[in-house]
Image: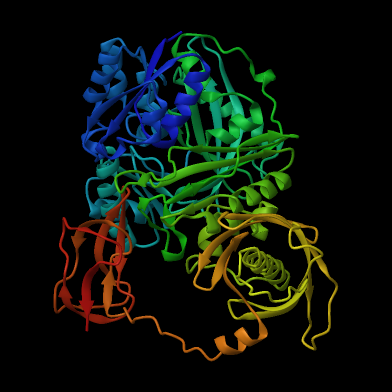
Amino acid sequence: MFKKILIANRGEIACRVIKTAQKMGIATVAVYSDADKRALHVKMADEAVYIGPAPAASSYLIADKIIDAATQTGAQAIHPGYGFLSENAEFAKALEKAGIAFIGPNVKAIEVMGDKIASKKFASAAKVNIVPGYMGLIESTDQAKKIANEIGYPVMIKASAGGGGKGMRIAHSEGEVEEGFNASKSEAKSSFGDDRIFIEKFIVDPRHIEIQVLADKHGNVIYLGERECSIQRRNQKVLEEAPSSFLDETTRVAMGEQSVALAKAVNYESAGTVEFIVDKDRNFYFLEMNTRLQVEHPVTEMITGVDLVEQMINVAANKKLKFAQKNIKLNGWSIESRIYAEDPFRSFLPSTGRLSSYQPPIETSKDGVSVRNDTGVFEGGEISIYYDPMIAKLVTHAPTRTEAIAHMSRALDEFYIDGIAHNIPFLSAIMCHDRWIKGDITTNFIAEEYPDGFSPRAPLPDELKLLSSVAATIDFLGNARRRGISDQMHGQRVSFAEKRIVKIDDHLQHLRVETSSFESNDLSIVFLDDEGVDQKPTAVEFDWWFGESIWKGCVGDQEMAVQVRPILNGYELSYAGLSVESYVYTQREAELVALMPYKEPPDTSKYLLCPMPGLVVDVMVQEGQEVKAGQSLCVVEAMKMENILKAERDCTVSSIQAEAGDSLAVDAVIMEFE
């Protein structure tokens, strides 16, 4: 077995590999760029080696620097994680030449399966069903349009060396092919150093289901069930689960056996994933094979009990698999939520900056229910513009899918992040969505359910009462706290029943708070109807005090975890995908507040503002030019993704205040319109 390994990656996956290596008694070496000097993976590793400037192309993608780091520290093997050099055959060859073990498949498998074009040709020759498409190299936009017309719309434009949703576009017309082809090539070049593109038929209403395979160097290959990854946005996976609620046992076995056959045909070794597109009739088509560890591997680990990183290390050390296919049993249900530094309220644009607060839920495993959080960040750390925006992967495991969803919803409510925008409100909203709960999902789920982007839904009447109860509890505790401070109440008599008006957004709730003791952690909320008549009291039990970010308790029989953020004269409460502003008033305070003037926000409709910190790649218009609604104006790159900013209305460009190569802050003015 290896005594020391180097992890040729950063962030969450580097930390994940380090944890397993430590469990196995193996020393670890981290590598880091200028942007990662104080990163968590650097702190966790036994040693760390600096490899260059922040851009990945100058550090994490330079194979020679990685190999030099391994040589100087005496690392016997390298785990590539995912992304970066994980599917780079030349890197694997260089390691072989240097006498360093690659914790991954052999070079042939990487070359054949790691390249999307080559893998489809190989799969076709092996009689594996593939999606119709053109698997040759596409040299020009005109050729891309011709091929797309022959295949028939819609088509998928994909980077051959791609992954993680980078370099992928769906096109429904020649115009979209032209725009998508150029954008995909540019993204692919930036992210992978390889701008080869291919085009295939896009299957309408598909599910994205993948099979995890595991193989050793002695001819043993098994599959570890499936993962469903259909909840995607811009071809980037958002939620994953294992197993799939859609597959029956016959289809599961057929997909698994086909995946094993494909792996054997290429003499595969290590962990790998065979991805399929599955239609509504459970017909499945080979999509690609990822010759690396997948981002979503934890859900497979949770339902099988197999540590995939440990198995990869064992295989690289020439050990045989200790289990056969008959030993693999699927236990319960697991769900993974990818928590990203992106703003769901601003079209999911990337967000960068410092994590002023980072408080994940407690990792637990009790009574058949587990909560796991794989992360590479910490409170006070920085989310950089140079890398993928992932903050963490939150995973739950329970006996049933319903229970796994319920525990995920609770865990998301307990996940408190401030300092940057993040997608937890969006993930929480999905957990409550009827289609998700029923398992009625496709890769079009987000586009269909949120066609105009994501915005917080309005609270239902029952939810208003729940949140009003929490707001009233917070106000009541505030009063109790002030009564305990010397001279604050000037000897005023204290009441054990207080009438209040709770304002949540535009809703007013009249209620009375009652308690038997100001020191107790329970009280009663009595709501009043429109005639002022008491309704049935609601018991509230809580475990919260001022300064805590999460209010935990029960309102009636509803167990809740509510995020609490102070705002002027009130609190913002976040719960189950809801985010509301709450204020608690006495009758007189409510009368005075109603008289306060409303301050209108500034009009920014005449400006194109940079929606996130990023690099201007291209300005596509000129001063004085008339533009139409929907016309592309500018391309801004952030976190390895190119974002095309378009005109919202017909107008004329009066001035341009940024040019290609400029680094802009959020809300910086790019251009002004007449």
- Observer-nearest residue: 552 or 449? 552
Residue drawn 55% across and 30% down?
Answer: 212
- Observer-nearest residue: 551 or 158? 551
Image location (x, y in percent) of residue 475? 64, 69
- Observer-nearest residue: 668 or 321? 668
- Left/right placement of residue 370 relative to residue 426 reads right
Is residue 20 among what the camera can see? yes
- Observer-nearest residue: 162 or 111? 162
Q: Quadrant of the C terminus?
A: bottom left
Q: Is residue 552 above or below residue 310?
A: below
Image location (x, y in percent) of residue 241? 61, 42
Q: Which residue is farthest right?
A: 536
Q: Is residue 380 above or below residue 433?
A: above
Q: Is residue 270 above or below residue 76?
A: below
Q: Which residue is farthest bottom?
A: 595
Residue 121 image-quadrant placement? top left
Is residue 128 among what the camera can see? no
- Left/right placement of residue 384 relative to residue 263 reads left
Residue drawn 46% across and 19% down?
Answer: 268
Image location (x, y in percent) of residue 478? 63, 66
Residue drawn 59% across and 32% down?
Answer: 300
Residue drawn 57% across and 13% down?
Answer: 321
Image location (x, y in percent) of residue 395? 59, 40
Residue 627 image-quadrant placement? bottom left
Q: How many marks?
A: 0
Colour mapping: rainbow
- Left/right placement of residue 398 relative to residue 295 reads right
Q: Is residue 275 above or below residue 389?
A: above
